[in-house]
Amino acid sequence: MTKIIITIDGWSSCGKSTLARGLAKELKYVYIDSGAMYRAITLYFLRHHVDWSDNASVQQHLADVSLEFHHNAHTDQSEMYLNGENVEYVIRDLVVAEKVSEVAALGPVRTFAVAQQRKMGARKGIVMDGRDIGTVVFPHAELKIFMTADNAIRVERRFKELYAKNPNITIEEVKSNLEMRDYIDSHRAISPLRQAEDAVVLDNSYMTMEEQLAWAIKLVHERV
Ligand code: C5P
């Protein structure tokens, strides 16, 4: 069967990665979590105390950043590696989430990440989720999904996820982080989050994973 490129963009904590992962598994495609790349770069910048208002310093540090995804046979999921270190767990921390939208708004950071994302999609058969995948990274993708969900439901979902790792976290912290990221992501000058004209909208507030998957698979079959 012909392989296509599937992009999933949308607001924070809409369940993009869950759907993307499910689709990739079903179709035997590669799943790429582009947000993990921005999170890993942010982790690197935080660890190296990079002053990201200084463009030259950003460029210089990016030259030392190597990002790779490796499959974990144990969990059957792809995980983010930063300079050879598995950072899949640590990049989900609120400390990284608090800064990632600032870092992801920087021109050199986007150029760096987008070039790698395009290479990953060169042979198609890929599902990539993020904010600008259907608009900028793969504007000619065969299937573009734009996801949304009720704000309260999104906060609840992310809170549950983060609380499992850190019981000190509060729902207010999670809510304000999501609001801040959505605001910065949709208002930045370069590649802001927006729905591509040819994207299909999915509001999954009241849908089960099985329903979402069936909905998306139907769209794939209409395109291959
Ligand atoms: O998808 P996730 O919530 O992990 O993404 C973290 C952050 O990375 C987003 O809030 C956004 O600032 C940035 N991002 C982006 N472009 C993408 C994917 C993520 O700017 N394609």
Image (tube, grey):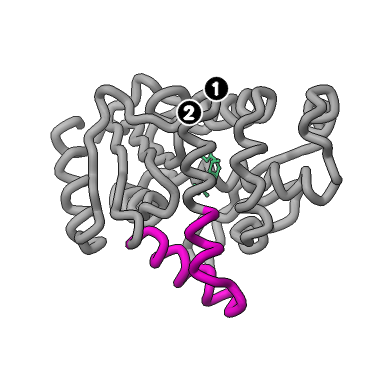
Residue 101 image offset from top left, x and y in percent: 59, 41
Could you say which is closer to the camera, residue 80 or residue 26? 80
Residue 173 image offset from top left, x and y in percent: 56, 63
Q: Secondary structure at mark 2?
A: loop
User: Within the magenta stretch, is there residue 168?
Assistant: yes
Q: Name which residue lies at 77% across and 34% down.
A: 52
The C terminus lies in which quarter of the figure?
top left
Mark 2 belongs to which amino acid?
Pro
Q: Secondary structure at mark 1?
A: loop
Mark 1 belongs to which amino acid?
Ala
Q: Which mark is residue 189?
A: 1
> Based on the displayed image, in which of its 4 quarters is residue 66 positioned?
top right
> Based on the displayed image, in which of its 4 quarters is residue 202 positioned?
top left
From this view, report whether residue 81 is shown above or below residue 120.
below
Q: Name which residue lies at 20% across and 46% down.
A: 217
Q: Point out the stretch of residues depicted in magenta.
A: 153-177
Q: Name which residue lies at 31% across and 38% down.
A: 146
- Number of marks: 2
User: Crowdedness of circle 1 by 10 Å Cα count: few (<14), some, many (20+)?
Assistant: few
The N terminus lies in which quarter of the figure?
top left
Q: Which mark is residue 192?
A: 2
Q: Which mark is residue 134?
A: none
Q: Name which residue lies at 17% across and 39% down.
A: 219
Could you say which is closer to the camera, residue 89 or residue 163? 163
Residue 51 image offset from top left, x and y in percent: 83, 36
Callouts 2 and 1 close, C-beta under 8 Å: yes
User: Within the magenta stretch, is there residue 131?
Assistant: no
Residue 97 image offset from top left, x and y in percent: 61, 53
